[in-house]
Image (cartoon, grey):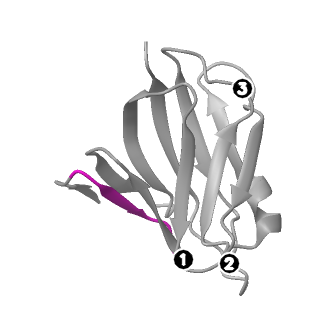
Amino acid sequence: MKKLIASLMVVFTLGIGSFQVNTVHAETETTQGVKICNTIKNVPTNKIWKVTFNKPVDVKSLNYISVVPQYGTAVKLHVYTSKNKKIVYVAATKKYIKNHNYTVLLYNIKSTSGQTIKPSYFTFKTIK
């Protein structure tokens, strides 16, 4: 199922929460229930991703967040939460490489009540 979201902010539903991006994208859901979003372009090399949930997340499950470049191994990350654990920040420990494609993977993330969100991912390309 493919739908175009015609607003300046896309709310990317993740089961127990939502992911917000400041751009316009088409969102799809595959038959396996994995949510995906089209490529986000012109991302700064020092971007910190902010993922907002409706419920507090289990901090131990945040080890399942990863950022993978198109070529190479996963980026080392610093992942931390807001005080109420409803906002998760994902920051690379080093700047992303300019004009490169990356994929952010969110899977096996659980709320503090034990609910698991649907696996999700999105891709982005850094500025030139």
Three-letter residue code for mark 3 = Lys
Foreground pick, 11 / 79: 79
Q: Look at 66% across and 58% down and name the residue there.
A: 107
- In front: label 3 or label 1: 3
Three-letter residue code for mark 2 = Ser
Cα distance in 3D space between marks 1 and 2: 7 Å
Q: Secondary structure at mark 2?
A: loop
Cα distance in 3D space between marks 3 and 1: 30 Å
Q: Look at 52% across and 18% down and name the residue there.
A: 100
Cα distance in 3D space between marks 3 and 2: 28 Å
| Residue wearing tag 3 | 94
| Residue wearing tag 2 | 111
Q: In the displayed image of the protein, which residue is found farthest to the right?
A: 60
Tell me: 6 left or right of 70: left
What's the magenta region?
8-15
Give coordinates of residue 76: x percent, y percent: 78, 34
Q: Quadrant of the N terminus?
A: bottom left
| Residue wearing tag 1 | 16
Mark 3 or mark 1: whose residue is earlier in sequence: 1
Foreground pick, 13 / 47: 47
Q: Is residue 42 above or below residue 122?
A: above
Q: Is residue 55 above or below residue 120?
A: below
Q: Secondary structure at mark 1?
A: loop
Q: In the displayed image of the protein, which residue is found farthest to the front?
A: 83
Inspect this view and state whether residue 30 appears: no
